[in-house]
Image (spheres, rainbow, N blue to C red):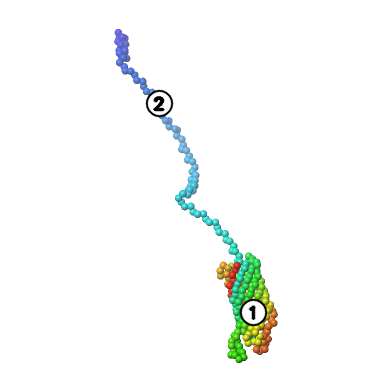
Amino acid sequence: MLAAALFASLLAQAEQAPPQVPAEPRQPQAAPAVPAPATAPATPPPTSAPPAPAPAAPSAAAPVPPAAPPPLVAQPEPPAPANSVSVHVRYAYRVGGEGDGLVPASGLSLGGEFERRLAAFQSGIELGVATNFFYDRFTKDIVVASAGAEPGIGTRTLSQTSFALMETNAWRYADMRLFVAVGGGVTVGYFASPDLSANSTTDVMAFARGVAGFDFAIAARTAAILRFDYSHTFKRDSYYTTTPGDIRPLFGDLFDAGIGLLVRF
């Protein structure tokens, strides 16, 4: 009886029990972290100098400086033109004629010269040739008496016109040039006096001439000149008689000094 009652009680509990809901699967739990064993601190890597910063690229808005111009190379100055022409105004002096009373010893000289340079050297030495023409004139006013007329004033004239070929030597320094020249040619002497029976006298003579002087530039191709000449005549066929009775040649040596203007081309 007891067994039957116990069985009936168990059967009644089984009928009253609610249906079981299947349980959700459980997520696996992570294993607890195991602390790492204590070790010595790592040695820091050796320090090195920081790399140099790269140059910054130029900004598009920043102005680019202009490139420096190429250095200038000094160019040698071009040589002066080889040809030149000059005109001269000079004081003329009759050497040995100051006491003859014929005409004054002092006079006026006008002339010109053409020169061509043949060679020039780095030292400044120049060689060339020249041809020149000069007219030296001496005058004197005198009283002229004529028969049956009142005395009048006349002019006594003595002149020497020369043509010469010269060899020139010069030394140029900057804008200044020193020069000398030697040469010769012919001179035509002329004498006329209203108080003499013969109206005029003309003579052609050979002569030699020496020249010295210098010129300096006043413009690109223009120079001023200071020049001295001495001309010696060889042939003297025309003479005159002085008041004391001395016989002297009409034409003789000349000394000239003056200034001029030179143009190169």
Outermost residue toward the bottom? Answer: 148
* Amino acid found under the numbered disc labelled 2: Pro
User: Do we see residue 99 in this rendering?
Assistant: no
Identified at 49% across, 43% down, the residue is 47
Which SS class for mark 2?
loop
- Give the Cα distance between marks 1 and 2: 147 Å
Q: Position of residue 54 (x, y in %)?
A: 49, 47
Decide: few, some or many residues near mark 1? Use Cα within 10 Å; few <14, some 14-19, many ≥20.
many
Amino acid, disc 1: Gln
Q: Relative to the observer, which residue lies in front, 165 or 188?
A: 188
Query: Which quadrant of the figure contains the N terminus?
Result: top left
In terms of depth relative to the viewer, which is nearer, 45 or 151? 151
Which mark is on residue 28?
A: 2
Residue lying farthest to the top in this orientation: 1
Q: Residues within 10 Å of mark 2 (few under 14, many from 20)?
A: few
Q: Nearer the viewer, mark 1 or mark 2?
A: 1
Give above or below for 15 relative to 211.
Answer: above
> 2 or 99: which is nearer to us?
99
Q: Which residue corresponds to mark 1? A: 160
Q: Residue 174 appears at what percent x and percent y?
A: 59, 67
Could you say which quadrant of the image residue 158 lies in?
bottom right
> Above or below — where is 10 with respect to 23?
above
Q: Is residue 30 visible?
A: yes
Looking at the rendered structure, the secondary structure element under dot 1 is: strand
